[in-house]
Amino acid sequence: MSDVIEYITIANTGNSTDFGDLLSSNRYISGTSSTTRGLFFGHGDGGTINRIQYITIANTGNSTDFGDLTVGRYYSAAAASSTRALCGGGRNGSTYYNVIDYVTIASTGNATDFGNLITHKMDHGAASDKITAVFAGGRGNSDGSSAPTHETIDSVTIASTGNASDFGDLNNDKSYGTSGVSNAHGGIA
Amino acid sequence: MTTKDFTANVISATKVVPNGAFENSKASGVWDLSEQFDLVKGGNWPNIGNPATRALFAGGYGGGATDTVDTLLLASAGNATDFGNLTIAKYYLSNGGAASSTRAVYAGGTNNDGDRLNVIEYFTFASTGNGTDFGDMATATSTGAGFSSSTRGIFAGGET
C-alpha cells in the first residue's frame, strides 16, 4: 500500500513528482476536487475507513483530515462541481452500498446524505461537470454478492439532493474498475 | 443547441457554415463591420460558447482487462460511445483521472497478468483516438485516487 501523493503538470508530459503523503497508506480510495481543493474518500485499510482527507492542489504537502463519510466504505467513486463533492457507492466487507454522500468542498466537516444510486455497487467510475455527476459501471448487489456486474450509468444533479436516475450504459465490456474524468470537472470550465 | 450559419464576404462571398454544433464548431471567414453590426443587432454574433462537457471512462474489467475508452456528453443522457484505446489493457487505474479542459491524463492500473503499472498516458478531449505516453509514476500503483485542478494532476495512494 502507498501513502504517496504525486503530481503532474497536465500540459507538460513527464514523470510525476512527489507532492506529500496521505494520512496513512490507503488503497481503494476515491477522489475528486474543485479547482483548488482535492478530497479523498474512504479507504480499504481498517479503522478509519469513513475518513475524508483533503489537500490544497496548488501547494505541495501532506493531506489533512476533512471529516467523515456517513458510512465507512471503500471502492466508492467521487465527482464534484466547483462547490460540492459527491461520493457514491462502495463496499465494507460483504456490504455493498448505494449511498451517495456530499460535502461542501470549501469547508471541512462530516458528509451529509444526498440520496441513493440505482443499484448497490463498488468498483465504478465517476465524472461530472458543474451540473451533473455520473457514476458508471461497477459490480455487487444489495445481498452482499460481488455479482452482478453493472454497465449502467447513474446520474444526479449535483446542486440538489435525491436519488440517481438512469443515464444510459457504458459502450464496451468494462463492468468494473473503470476510471472517469471530464473536461469540466470541479469548476474548471 | 441549434447550429447557426454565419455569412462572410471579405475573403469569400461563400456562405460559411460551422462544421458542427455551435458550441463545438469552427467557422472560417471574416465579417466586415456592417455585417458585424447587423449580426450583433440581430443577436446572432457568434459569441464563444461553452464547450460541451465530455466524460471519458478508461479501462476496466469485463472478462479480462480492457483497453477501451468510452465517452459520453454529460448534457445528454444516453449510452456511451467508443473514444479510443489505452496503450495497454488495464483496470483499477487511478479512481478518477486528471484533466484540463483539453487533456485527460490517467495513471497506474493493473494489467491482465495482475502486474501493477506506473504508466501515465493522456488523451485529447477534442479528438477521438488512442492514448499517448505521458511519463511514469514514481511507483507502479493501482486502486489509488486521482483528480486535478485545471493545470495540476494529483494521484495518490493505492496498492503497490
Image (cartoon, grey):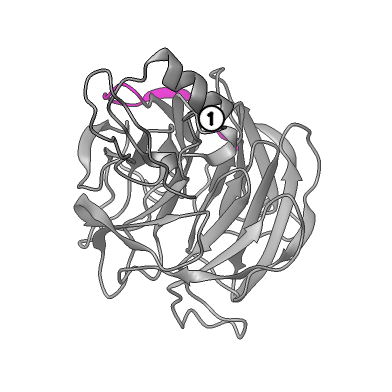
Tell me, yes or no, if residue B158 can be seen here.
no
Q: Residues within 10 Å of mark 1 (few under 14, many from 20)?
A: many
Question: What residue do we see at 18% from left, 52% from top?
Answer: B88
Disc 1 target residue: A21
Residue B16 x, y percent position in the rendering:
29, 35
Residue A31 percent across, percent down from the top left? 55, 44
Kindly identify the amino acid type of the residue bearing the numbered disc 1.
Asp
Pick the front one: B20 or B67: B20
Q: Main secondary structure of the magenta part?
A: loop
Up/down of B63 relative to B82, above or below:
below
Above or below residue A15? Residue B111 is below
Quarter holding residue B28: top left
Q: Nearer the viewer, residue A170 or A72?
A: A170
Residue A65 falls inside the magenta stretch: no
Q: Position of residue B38 (x, y in %)?
A: 50, 24
Give the residues drawn in magenta, as a range.
A11-24
- Residues A106 and A43: in front is A106
Between B11 and B26, the one nearer to me in the picture: B11
The picture quadrant where one finds residue A64 is top right
- Mark 1 residue element: strand
Identify which residue is drawn at 46% across, 67% down. B78
Q: Is residue A162 visible?
A: yes
Q: Residue furthest top?
A: B33
Task: Please count the marks in the image.
Answer: 1
- From what the image shows, is residue B124 above or below residue B47? below
Q: Determine the residue positioned at 20% across, 61% down.
A: B113
Q: Position of residue B15 (x, y in %)?
A: 28, 35
Report whether A81 appears left or right of B108. Answer: right
Return the chain for callout 1: A
**Residue at x-position 52% and y-position 83%:** A145
Q: Answer above or below: position of A48 versus B34.
A: below
